[in-house]
Image: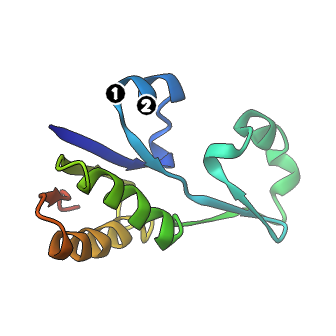
Amino acid sequence: MVRIITDSTSSIPQDIRAELGIEVASLIINRNGEELVELETDLDAFYKDIYEMADNIPTSSQPPLGKVREVVESIAKTGDEVLGIFISSKLSGTFESFVHTAKEVKMTSPTSVSLPSTA
């Protein structure tokens, strides 16, 4: 079986993720010195204040490496293959984090870990 890993920029609703077994690693939103886990953030409320953020625009960070490794290993342990679909590597380090982790996991696990190249 091929399992999908993606990041929270995919905006796949929770019910669809659960139904299809899609694993998601959440990016971090940095706003006013506070770190928010994107998947745990009420984005409607967040964007409601978007005009107030004009002078202090929030940034984002790639998922923590520990979470990336946890997601990849959880699938690799089942023997399933992994297909990663992520935000462009030109916009985020998320793709590179998964590539690095996939190489490490592939060395320690007999399963196949595949990540598409990015343009």
**Contact flag, marks 2 and 1 (Cβ < 8 Å):** yes
Residue 87, given in percent of the width and then of the height, sits at 39, 55
Residue 9, given in percent of the width and then of the height, sits at 49, 47
Residue 99 horizontal side relative to residue 2, left or right: right
Q: Nearer the viewer, residue 6 or 18?
A: 18
What residue appears at the point 20 percent right and 58 percent down from the top-left corner?
115
**Quarter of the picture holding the N terminus:** top left
Q: Nearer the viewer, residue 72 or 5?
A: 72
Residue 71, given in percent of the width and then of the height, sits at 40, 56
Give the residue type at disc 2: Arg
What residue appears at the point 51 percent right and 28 percent down from the top-left corner?
13
Residue, disc 1: 20
Q: Nearer the viewer, residue 4 or 44?
A: 4
What residue appears at the point 52 percent right and 29 percent down from the top-left corner?
14
Residue 73, placed above or below residue 2: below
Residue 86, placed above or below residue 18: below
Question: How crowded is the residue under tag 1: few (<14 C-alpha within 10 Å), some, or many (20+)?
Answer: few
Residue 103 occupies which quadrant of the picture? bottom left
**Mark 2 falls on what kind of element?**
helix
What is the tally of numbered marks visible in this picture? 2
What residue appears at the point 17 percent right and 69 percent down from the top-left corner?
106
Residue 40, given in percent of the width and then of the height, sits at 68, 45
Residue 51 horizontal side relative to residue 14, left or right: right
**Mark 1 falls on what kind of element?**
helix
Residue, disc 2: 17
The colouring scheme, among rainbow, by chain, secondary structure or one colour, is: rainbow
Residue 47 horizontal side relative to residue 97, left or right: right
- In the rendering, which numbered label is found on residue 59? none
Q: Nearer the viewer, residue 93 or 75?
A: 75
Give the residue type at disc 1: Leu
Question: How crowded is the residue under tag 2: few (<14 C-alpha within 10 Å), some, or many (20+)?
Answer: some
